[in-house]
Image: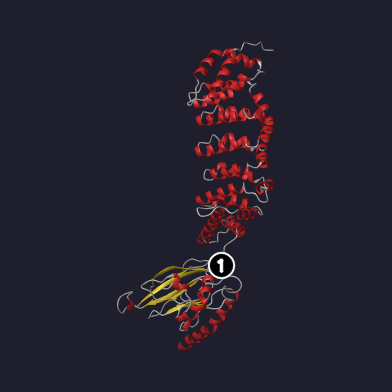
Amino acid sequence: MNNKAFFFLLLSLVLLPLYAFAVVSVGGWSPISDVKDPHVVEIGVTAGTNYRLMVTVDGSIGVAGAGVSKKYEAIVWEKPWLKSMNLTSFKPTFHVVTVKKECDADCRRINDTILTHPLNMPANLLYRLWGGEKGREVKIGPCLSKGGAARGASTPARRLSLQRHSGSLSSSGLAREPSDQSDNGGGKMKGLFKSKPRTPADIVRQTRDLLLYADRSKSLPDLRESKREEKMAELSRNIRDMKSILYGNSEAEPVAEACAQLTQEFFREDTLRLLITCLPKLNLETRKDATQLVANLQRQQVNSRLIASDYLEANLDLMDVLMEGFENTDLALHYGAMFRECIRHQIVARYVLESEHVKKFFDYIQLPNFDIAADAAATFKELLTRHKSTVAEFLIKNEDWFFADYNSKLLESSNYITRRQAIKLLGDILLDRSNSAVMTRYVSSRDNLRILMNLLRESSKSIQIEAFHVFKLFAANQNKPADIINILVANKSKLLRLLADLKPDKEDERFEADKTQVLREIAALEPRDLA
């Protein structure tokens, strides 16, 4: 029995180096075979890794009490791609087998397990195995990349001198080279730990990759939640970084060249589409950052050209996606703000006006959620007032159904806020010179006059004032139809009395002049025979 045990032990010793060599050659673990090696005793590690370090602190220097030695575990997280190294934990260790997951974004992760043999360890995770009757330490080497050659394979081994302090270990101590290199190695180490700044284009490309990951992550159930959270956190940071480039921060104003680079790369591919599609998967703060990012990008010019407009012209279906967002309570305000910024471009506004989307606003404005309804009203106003020629063309073609819905759903709404916003917007539309032809036809309708006269009787002075600005167009029309004149004559005394008492809260000479003219016109009216 003893011979068999000895045979298997010998076989393990022969196969273990072969296994380690195979793993390292394709990217995996590189075990430290000799724990008594002077470099290991001095706690040397391979460059370009994540690792844990075991530190013995002698109690004679006043750490744990006279004559008592304590073992501490120092967890060091090195990000080779950023050339940074941080001490993240320093605490007493225990005589147990522990698993510590410390990997960069490329590493795979599994659930915590208790391991009893180095060969059970999967690649791409970092473990420290602590065992033995006398607290013997066995360090199983660094975390390497999961594909190709080992991350540190082409980098010479580097020793990190760990210095004993009073119960603590500083990150600067980790970064210090041994004394035999202190004269000429300090500058190299200082340069090594500097992070290489990412260009705006780099950030956009990384963000695009992360958005692609977020878009398909839910369809991959084998992905662990910890990895998904790590990726989403990185995505949030990138979106925040892009926002800072475009808006600047408390320390610096935005740089035009950086903004141009970011904008050009953002619209080079479908980053905007991905961002809109993945918005539901982002947390609230990241959604806010994304909304502000999209809004700013609509204004960014590259070589005196709004490339956002060119992109949207080729991807007008994105407006369909944004429009659907109004029906999602959690996303409506974010999608609404993006939609409002996109219709700053005339080609986009024309697409929306010529589609069935414009009819949906009559319903969105009356949603029970006040914030969403107000946001929809603001977007509706932007759509009908920004691009004068496009709006005039739309109203001429769609006058009948548009004003019929406007009157019945908005001006005659049971909601006070809706009525007030609607009468104000109606005045803005009709009083715009580009809509003069539409205004002339509007004030020739007796149904429209009836609605305006009812609004003049509202108990709210704000609605009365706004209604007056539209009603005066009926009175000032020099080509009034006979039925309009007869309605005004039939209600002459009531109108003269009501208008005489109508006054704004603040003195307004223009208002008083308009009211005087309207009173004069109504007083001079005589009945007309209907043709």
- Secondary structure beneath dot 1 equals loop
Q: Which residue is at a point 64% across and 46% down the rendered structure image? A: 318
Which image quadrant for residue 402?
top right
Q: Position of residue 454 (x, y in %)?
A: 54, 21
Q: Residue beneath label 1, please?
A: 81
Of 261 and 397, nearer the camera is 261
Q: Where is residue 458 in the image (x, y as percent from the top left)?
A: 50, 23
Of 81 and 183, nearer the camera is 183
Of 382 and 124, nearer the camera is 382
Q: Which residue is at a point 50% across and 74% down the rendered structure image? A: 186
Question: Where is 177 relative to 341, above or below?
Answer: below
Q: In which quarter of the image is the C terminus?
A: top right
Which image quadrant for residue 358?
top right
Q: How is the image coloured?
A: secondary structure
Question: Where is 517 relative to 51, above or below?
Answer: above
Q: Where is residue 502 in the image (x, y as percent from the top left)?
A: 50, 21
Of 431 and 249, nearer the camera is 249
- Asked whether residue 174 is in view, the answer is yes
Which image quadrant for residue 168?
bottom left
**Amino acid type for the residue under numbered disc 1:** Trp
- Asked whether residue 95 is in view, the answer is no
Q: Position of residue 46 (x, y in %)?
A: 52, 76
